[in-house]
Amino acid sequence: MTPARPATDPLAQLLQGTWIDPDSGRATGVAIAAIAIEDHLRGREAECVAALGLGRRLAVVSDVTTHRVLGARLERALAPLARIDSVVLPLHVHADMAAVATVRAATAGADALIAAGSGTINDLAKFTAATDGKPFAVFPTAPSMNGYTSANAAITVDGHKKTLPAALARGVFIDLEVLAAAPPRMIRAGLGDSLCRSTAQVDWLLSHYLLGTAYREAPFALLAQDEPALLGAPEALLAGDLAALRALARTLVLSGIGMTLCGGSYPASQGEHLISHYVDMRAPAGRAEFLHGEQVAVATLTMARIQEALLAGPPPALRASAVDLPALQRHFGAEVGAACWSDFAPKRLDAAGAAALSARAAAQWPALRRHAAAIFVPTATLAAVMRRAGGPTSAADIGVDAAFYAGAVRHARFLRDRFTFLDLADDAGLLTDPFLA
């Protein structure tokens, strides 16, 4: 039986449109019709989907593994409700434009898409749904990432991993018994993707204090009830404890909603995700497959070390950025290098800009340090949580050597226009060996 949630449960309030946004003081909701996080949903699949009014022809999108785990069951359950197009993608399919084209062709006649899967399957289905103007719902097969309730998708375009607008799910239906049976690595990956709340929030604060970019407390307030339980007993996740998995599932769902409320991935994707994206884009040939959350866990520890060290010291003195377009094209190749330059150029510092930002940092450093101290999770705590769950904590644990990983940390800032502690450390000449491992 699903335990009763407190009257102040933010997820229930969001679905009712009564959650009070701490930034505006106004009642706020989310444009998702239904979110279920239940001990099991077997026998209730058609009931869940029927309430959404998705149409009479539904495409169930899975891959070979998730079709066996849940997709086939879902197709059988929905058959009395609608005509079912079974779209089963190959193992190890990547979320790139070629796979998007495949999914679009296979779902062309459907009224709506339903994903039975996790990260890649979810991204492909919701990006296809947005491209073709169709509704979308998801039945997750693993608690491996926080994208089930976000309105963006990680899609690789011409070798450049991008976060692109996607359809917001009409319904998210989580069967905890299915999640409990997921491979342990996928459960650890969800924990890893959740750890970055602290580093992402501090990176966002940095941009807010130094550049004046918009910042919101709302996405982090959503997580406040569940994060302590998640970090307090990570071992329980791997023991099939449904209460622990519920805390993880809620954290992932609420993190995704936080992104949706903010109109972007700012509260959940900052420097640590840029490092992970670089690894995805540039990993050596023949490297084993690693999950997004595994990479994010390791990159989160790197970002936490950088943030902890810089915030413990005086305001950094910045210098002009030395990198130019030819340098990026030499490193990334002509096409991807040009795309990186387009994202990096707006935050590139000339001498005057470096002097102005140094002065701004000096003025804002005490306030930034106080604010960050109130919400920062120490590096040692984050590392202990991952170790207790048996998760990755080093570059070697995600299949790359120290030299490659150091390059990832040094070059990740060029992948997006987001200003993070990677930019601050590099332009201050402080992105040095202790932080690159």
Image (cartoon, rainbow, N blue to C red):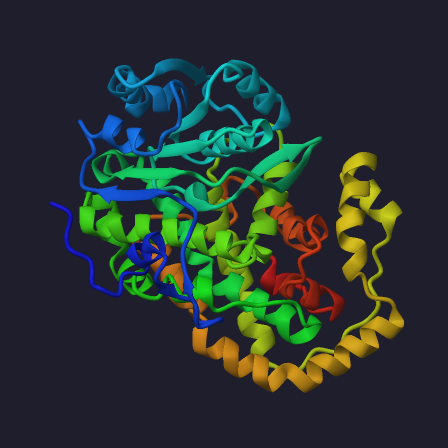
* Vertical comparison of 93 with 329: above or below: above
The residue depicted at 82 percent of the width and 66 percent of the height is: 349
Quarter of the picture holding the C terminus: bottom right
Residue 188 appears in view: yes
* Vertical comparison of 296 with 50: above or below: below
131 sits left or right of 253 in the view: right
Quarter of the picture holding the N terminus: top left
* Vertical comparison of 211 with 301: above or below: below
* Vertical comparison of 429 with 89: above or below: below
Residue 231: give x, y in percent of width and height.
31, 61
Out of 27 and 284, give the one closest to the viewer.
27
Out of 309 and 155, give the one closest to the viewer.
155
Out of 368 and 172, give the one closest to the viewer.
172
The residue depicted at 56 percent of the width and 41 percent of the height is: 400
Residue 415: give x, y in percent of width and height.
69, 48
Quarter residue 421 falls in:
bottom right
Residue 437 appears in view: no
